[in-house]
Image (cartoon, helix red, strand yellow):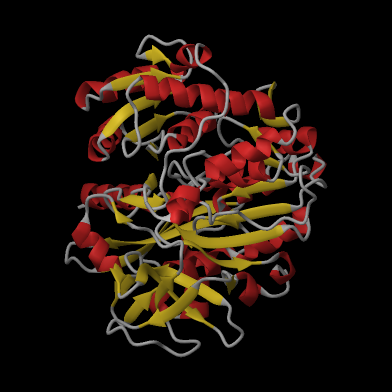
Amino acid sequence: MSADARTFRTYVEENLDALSADPVRETLVHQGRRVSAGEFRELVYRMARALSAQGVDRGQTVTLLSGNLPETIAARYAANLIGARVNHLYNKLSADAQAAIVRDVETNALIVDPRMAERAAEIAGSAPVPVVLTLGPAKTGTDLLELAAAQSGEPLPGRAQPQDVCTIRHTGGTTGHPKGICTTFAQARWFRGAPSDLPVGERRQLVCTTLAHAAGMMADSTINSGGTVVLLDDFDPATALAAIERERITDLFLLPPLLYQLMDHPDAPHTDTSSLRTLTYGGCQASPARIADAVRAFGPVLVQGYGQNEAGGISVLAPEDHDPLRPDRLRSAGKVVPGVEVAIRDTSGRDLPAGEHGEICVRSPMVMQGYWKQPELTAEVLRDGWLHTGDVGHLDGEGYLTIVDRLKDMIVVVGGHVYTTELEDLLNTHPDVLQSAVFGVRDADRTEQVHAVVVRAPGSGVDDRELRAMVCSARGAMYEPARVTFTDALPLTDAGKPDKKELRSQAEREFTAAR
């Protein structure tokens, strides 16, 4: 064992040390329940011993099926503390998809939110696991909290080594079958979330998106800083606005579609959001027009983070770059973060000059170890030390990175390529459009046609002809959608991204029915 391995401390151990600094401070809040740093720290140690007693050990897999509970974070910390890798299921996946992931990651223990006990039984029926544990009394499995209560809350040394797999995070599946992305314990220590200018202990983060996604890692950063994490079960704009005012929230992460819902809600103009210091958004493309609206609504607190589970953080658009009068700047994903290298390359692997579109390739300490049990796919995206992101973009002369599309979302039409995010940006500039999603659908000749689904502003009468004419005038006939349809709300994935896979399926069904 190397000297580095002997002295290595995981992110969990660092956070548990931070919790010991002030045991009585409020660390987690959920539905009126307030958990102190000392209580949470002891719970992690008790859970770790309980998991060990159930046979869970270093190098095994613990899968979480749980909502946003304080015990969810404690269970992840406990599993990682004893060196187990953690896979957190997206709750809105089908039971079949969840069972396939449970089998794929070789789950040794399934830890379940009691509210999801019926789904857990369904999963375990088709993907048997050695141990099913619940975060409280339930009809399925053994109560982990009861087991933990019988254990000691004294400190326990971590067992993980730097290159052990810490987490297996699955892609949302918006572009195909979910892929398991492996992150090591050494890499997990790199993530610190968006920078904050608040003194230690004064951060108050609202988590209203799933802990299985970026909000979970940001919660780790807040706990490490001595702050407080306020948990909501799910995103609801009215509930989130009330929590921001009531809990004096300083830090918030939202995917762009949820940010739009927050600022469009009738309660927004009457809610005190002055406590916000950092409103981070990311996870999918944002509309420059709508982000300008958000700056006007919430002030100079917006931060855009661009990254991937495979690559970690890549670039940041800082608050000072959020100028409503600079849509070109708001269209960018900001500047590459320190310690990360970015190259824009063509299909032959040649580096392209500033301004030219190509695939975004990344090299950094945060690049994933690989896809779980998929060596061929790993070799396809990890080449010569560089991660090929699958995103199309360009760097400008000032070093700002702009993402224009996913390679798989780019629509190939007669005459060239339609970049879906560019068309969405254009549609969203119309005063009667709140959101849009653009995707390609193949016709009877297997030729891709541009489709757009639009969310209109309340009371708007804008129709498809007006929007198509606007696009044709601004970008030419190549970008004009073959079809524009309207909806009250875009379907979202469990992570909160527009579900283009579902929209495309709907459009294909409608096309088939019309034939």
313 is higher (above) or lower (below) than 373 = below
Res 324 quadrant in image: bottom right
Residue 166 vs residue 255, the one in the foreground: 166
Place of residue 313 in the rendered image (x, y in percent of width and height, measured from the top left): 52, 62
Residue at (52, 30) in percent of width and height = 156
Q: Is residue 398 left or right of residue 187?
A: right
Residue at the spot x=36%, y=48% of the render? Answer: 164
Residue 206 seen from this side: no
Between residue 22 and residue 418, name the one nearer to us. Answer: 22
Q: Position of residue 124 (x, y in %)?
A: 26, 23
Q: Nearer the viewer, residue 288 or 170?
A: 170
Q: Residue furthest left?
A: 445
Residue 8 as seen in the image, left or right of residue 431: left
Q: Nearer the viewer, residue 160 or 450?
A: 160
Q: How many marks?
A: 0
Residue 385: tell me if it is visible.
Answer: yes
Q: State the image quarter where residue 494 is shown.
A: top left
Corner quadrant of residue 363: bottom left
Q: Position of residue 399 (x, y in %)?
A: 58, 81
Name which residue lies at 55% across and 40% down: 13
**Horizontal side of residue 254 vs 413, given as left or right:** right
Up the image or down, 81 lies above or below 305; here it is above
> Where 149 falls versus 510 (above or below)?
above
